[in-house]
Image (spheres, rainbow, N blue to C red):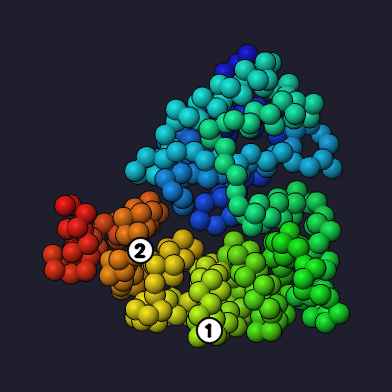
Amino acid sequence: MQSITTLSEFFQRTGAEVRLFDMGRRIAPFEFSRLTEFEAGATPWPLPWNGQARLACAFRLGSDAASEPLIWFLALPLDEQGMLVPGPRDAFLERLVETLGRTVESVGRDDAPHIDNLMRDNPLVFTPELTQQAILHAQAARDFAQPASKHHALVYAYLIDADTSVDWQMLGLQGIADLVARLESGEETRLAERIPVLPVEVLRPLCYCMEHRDLASACVEPLRERAEQAARSGDLETVCAVIRALGSSHDSRVGAWYDTLLDDPAACGPDVLAAMAARGWMHLEDEQRLPRFLTRLAETPQANFTALVRDLALVPRLRLPVLMTLRQASADSPIGLRLAELDR
């Protein structure tokens, strides 16, 4: 059988209809050309997660356009520069070729079970948590022009049409994910109007899904107000859920709110800092906010300073600013003192 050396080559030679998704800091479509460049060693992975390139490959083999796509969840190891460590990927491809046992070009839909079995006991495979699975399936169904799940209609009626006859306890996570994946601009405004009155049991999963799309500006203020209410009542889980959701917005009000949180030691504990780093990294691309974040992180003994700093430094756009902030910190500053502790 002809050898294949990259995932990109496998999909090209099988003629598969494929959609790629970055599964790291947020679930988002990933261009095929970027995977090709990444595997060629030309570019680092744009948004690493725990030292890995987390990738979902949704693809269909053969000519059956109505069939559900197969989905691979792959965690490809990265070096300190965010570049691919090729060995595990190469071993995966070798096993794939052995499993198929024929020329790649002849692979069809009948081979799907064999390819699917390849994922069992595979060291590269990871299992996303439930919300990630829901939003990935919602985005994949949308991109493959498949209908939303059966739960979508009820969620739409409750969140967009404000149908008071709908019992919120009947809403399914997959339906919320489908709604978020298919939201249009006019619907975003209607959703924003519903945020102030949503039960927290609906608000949280909605936030966890909304962190994986570009959040509409109309939703920023209602969400921030819900977070402030939650903070006053000691509901840290909801505060962090909103921080994560707002992290996907490009609205400058989000950065300003992050500043307010960072200026208040009582409001900015380890969970809040972790939420900012995980989903609000683009708001840390600020010459004043990033040092403020790292300082607050250093001042918070319960926070995992080393892990969060290392993780942020793997984001290509943040790597140099993070390293420069650490290097320029004076020995008696919170950052300098924290670094000194690590050297002991």
Number of numbered labels in the structure image: 2
Q: Residues within 10 Å of mark 1 (few under 14, many from 20)?
A: few
Which callout, 2 or 1, points at the residue further toward the start of the chain?
1
Q: Quadrant of the N terminus?
A: top right
Q: Position of residue 237 (x, y in %)?
A: 54, 71
Considering only vertical position in the picture, is 94 above or below 143? above
- Residue that appears at 81% across and 75% down: 167
Q: Position of residue 59 (x, y in %)?
A: 70, 39
- Left/right of residue 17 with respect to residue 49 in the rendered view: right
Considering only vertical position in the picture, is 86 above or below 178? above
**Mark drawn on residue 154:** none
Q: Position of residue 191 (x, y in %)?
A: 70, 77
Q: Position of residue 198 (x, y in %)?
A: 69, 79
Decide if residue 144 is in sight here.
yes
- Residue that appears at 77% across and 71% down: 169
Q: Secondary structure at mark 1?
A: loop
- Residue that appears at 64% across and 57% down: 131
Q: Quadrant of residue 257?
A: bottom left
* Residue receiving disc 2: 303
Give the Cα separation between the discs numbered 2 and 1.
Answer: 23 Å
Please name the amino acid that badge 1 sits on.
Ser
- Left/right of residue 21 with respect to residue 253 in the rendered view: right
* Residue receiving disc 1: 233
Q: Secondary structure at mark 2?
A: loop
Q: Residue furthest left?
A: 331
- Is the C-beta separation of discs 2 and 1 under 8 Å? no
Please name the amino acid that badge 2 sits on.
Ala
